[in-house]
Image (tube, rainbow, N blue to C red):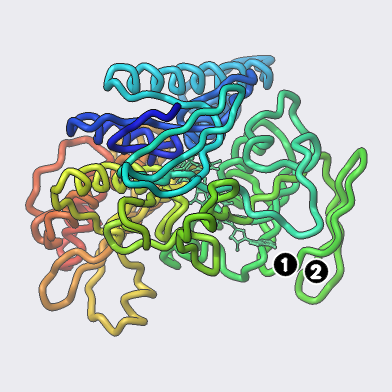
Amino acid sequence: MSQQFDVAVIGAGPGGYVAAIRAAQLGFKVACIDDFIGKDGTPALGGTCLNVGCIPSKALLQSSEHFHALNHDFAEHGITVKGASFDVAKMIERKDGIVKKLTGGIGMLLKKNKIEPFFGRASFADNSADGWIIDVAGTEPKRIIARNVIIATGSSPRPLPGVTIDNITILDNAGALDQAVLPKRLGIIGAGVIGLEMGSVWRRLGTEVTVLEALPDFLAATDRQIAKEALRTLTKDTGLDIHLGVEIGKITSGKEVIVAYKEGGEAKTLTVDKLIVSIGRVPHTAGLGAERIGLAVDARGFITVDDDCRTNLPGIWAIGDVVRGPMLAHKASEEGVAVAERIAGQKPHIDLGLVPFVVYTNPEIAWVGKTEEQLQAAGIAYRKGTASFLANGRALGLGQAKGTVKILADKNTDRILGVHMIGPMVSELISEAVVAMEFKASSEDLARIIHAHPSLSEVVHEAALAVDGRPLHG
Ligand code: FAD
Ligand code: NAI
């Protein structure tokens, strides 16, 4: 017996569940299928982001930041606490509680929107006059037929050849987020977003953290000026021991992990208690049956889509980490909304050039649009304005007066082309830049907008004024 739907969404991460809700809002009969099993052994909606990604990592970052502030920053406020201790298991329990609350909330949202959830792995069986036939494996196998299918199957950790993740000693993102005992020495392969965020968590709690990165450039996709400042503060203030341009050799693991590597041509070894492998993520299409129906996948394993997320097959769409573009939750969600609206005949538009990026280290790093290096390579003439958090009253009050905001604007039209930040709460400040750029604002527009005083956003205002060489406080 099969069930007929207008739209079947495969995957209930931030791409899939959002697509399902928007499709239901538009009046479609919607199914949402997901195979993620949570820590308690039961199905958990929300995908990588809610279960083992964005949300748990930010929960741990906050707990560890409080402990770090208590030990390092409170004294200047006149607060001294003797004998402060940290309960790692309690931190993990809090994180699990937040995950449970949010993943349970997705279940309620699906119910509220009359979306039928299916738990199990979905695979394409065939096409029919009534639509695409999808089988859902599980204790009670089910068959679904839908005229429109949105694939949102996400991504999984990129494996390092010859290394087995056991999530006891050698960890991927799931293991890195679930250590109930503080490791004394932690190694991290890959100084990307996961490496820096997870490295910060464990370093702030007292672990010795060594990060081994293959590329000679730190945070290679980031504006060089900001990346340089980030490397300096993460090394000096956070205490991460970051090695760039290394070549990883043999990794052996027993009671401890020994990583052989080459740095500047010299053979070295790193001995640690735990090792996180965070060298990027790969699109997840395993078990989907893509080949059975002739769904096109590119050489790197991403489902091939056009600008509107249409695949090569009629009625099948793909969004989020499993297609080209940044692997970010908000990008996946926006694609989900847009595809549901396209199925309904609307004409939404997404500009992948305006997806904001944030690294939740301390200080945070955030950017949107082009870097100086990209503008130079493209031969685009620009003016730049920079402003520092050093003299910002709100940042000084917070005790976080470090960092920079840089605005890049077209030399001829003054249109803002890129905004780059490192500093306190720039994860929030970047939204102003995204809004401005979506509205095709000039730096003069930002410079003439009233910003509250005292606020961190005044640094963005100063940077906009600086583009025209008229900063008031710089
Ligand atoms: P996913 O969230 O991966 O969801 C896909 C779902 O589909 C999963 O539940 C999977 O089990 C299921 N699935 C796969 N195949 C099938 C199948 N055949 N049948 C049924 N179900 C299937 N992004 C940010 O924007 N901000 C952050 O702060 C951030 N932090 C992160 C921290 C970490 C540690 C990690 C690993 C990632 C982080 N990300 C962050 C990235 C973010 O998690 C992803 O970009 C996002 O989850 C992608 O959403 P998605 O819906 O495409 O896929
Ligand atoms: P990443 O792409 O950010 O970084 C991987 C790093 O590993 C790169 O610097 C790369 O040069 C390096 N590397 C690759 N192979 C290597 C090797 N053999 N030896 C040493 N270094 C090697 O990937 P990461 O950190 O795994 O995260 C995956 C994705 O998850 C991110 O790209 C991002 O899309 C998402 N994410 C987003 C977050 C956020 O938005 N705050 C937080 C965490 C993850």
Q: Residue 112 in the image: x percent, y percent?
A: 28, 17
Quarter assignment of residue 466: bottom left
Residue at coordinates 64% horizontally, 36% vertically from top-left?
174
Q: Residue 136 in the image: x percent, y percent?
A: 52, 33
Q: Amino acid at mark 1?
A: Val
Q: Is mark 1 within 8 Å of ligand 2?
A: yes
Whether residue 316 sits left or right of residue 205 in the image: it is left
Quarter assignment of residue 117: top left
Residue at coordinates 60% horizontally, 50% vertically from top-left?
236
Whether residue 1 sits left or right of residue 278 in the image: it is left
The residue that disc 1 covers is 246
Q: Of helix, strand and loop, which one carries label 1?
A: strand
Q: Is residue 136 above or below residue 338?
A: above
Q: Is residue 293 above or below residue 199?
A: below
Residue extending furthest right?
A: 254
Measure how far apart labels 1 and 2 are at the Cα level. Answer: 6 Å
Q: Amino acid at mark 2?
A: Lys
Q: Residue 87 in the image: x percent, y percent?
A: 68, 17
Answer few, some or many: residues within 10 Å of disc 2's Cα (few below 14, many 20 plus, some between 14 and 19).
some
Quadrant location of the C terminus? bottom left
Q: Of helix, strand and loop, which one carries label 2?
A: strand
Whether residue 64 sits left or right of residue 311 in the image: it is right
The residue that disc 2 covers is 262
